Amino acid sequence: MSNSNPGDFVKLGELIRDIRVALLTTVGRDGRFHTRPVQTLQVEDDRTLWFFTDWSSPKVHELQHDATVSLGYADPAKNVYVAVCGSGSVFRDIQKAKQLWSIEQRAYYPEGPEDERLALLRVLIERAEYWIAPGRTSYLVAALTATASGTPAGVIGENRKIT
């Protein structure tokens, strides 16, 4: 495992763009976690992630109480996993909504980017980590090597921490 270097955030952005759907976790007023799926609309170079949400969503109230968020992305078919921690904020910005808009959003916001229910969720990434694991054969080889040597395998594949 290594600490972040400039290329790690570029790779993180590529992984998030490829997976797109994350599980967003916020903290409720009762201190309990609340997790739900969200579609990532944009990843910016300044460590910002963008999402749409509804002003009536519980996450809006949760973020007003505690801005701490966690996002988990997974693509098990490709053995790729991403974890993001940061702070979230919700606001209205019609110009940004127009920039992020796609036609399938009309299913949720029939009036388009100007829909009164449409809120922007911005997550500022504070820490992230990703794992890219090789296929099953690599694990079998590592298991055989560990069994023969008596030494556990280290990280198999690629693991990066971004701070």
Image (tube, helix red, strand yellow):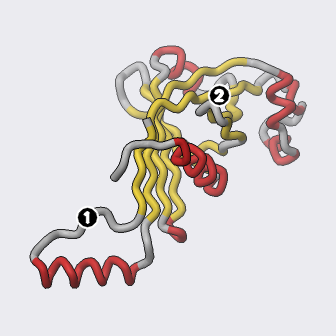
The amino acid sitting under disc 1 is Gly
Residue 96 is left or right of residue 28, and the answer is right
Residue 150, placed above or below residue 65 = below
Q: Is residue 37 left or right of residue 157?
A: right
Residue sitting farthest toward the left: 150
Residue annotated with mark 2: 121
* Whether residue 34 is visible: no
Residue 51 falls left or right of residue 31: right
* Residue 102 pos. (x, y %): 84, 43
Residue located at (50% from left, 41% from top): 71
Residue 96 position within the rendered picture, expressed as x and y whole percent measured from the top left? 80, 26
Residue 154 is marked as: 1
Which residue: 38% across, 43% down?
3
Residue 139, x across and y down, in percent: 33, 77
Q: Kindly identify the residue that appears in the image at 13 percent across and 84 percent down.
A: 148
User: Which image quadrant is residue 163 in?
Assistant: top left
* Tag shown at residue 64: none
Q: Nearer the viewer, mark 2 or mark 1?
A: 1
Q: Residue at x 47, y 15 (%)?
A: 65
**Residue that extends furthest to the top in the rendered view of this protein:** 65
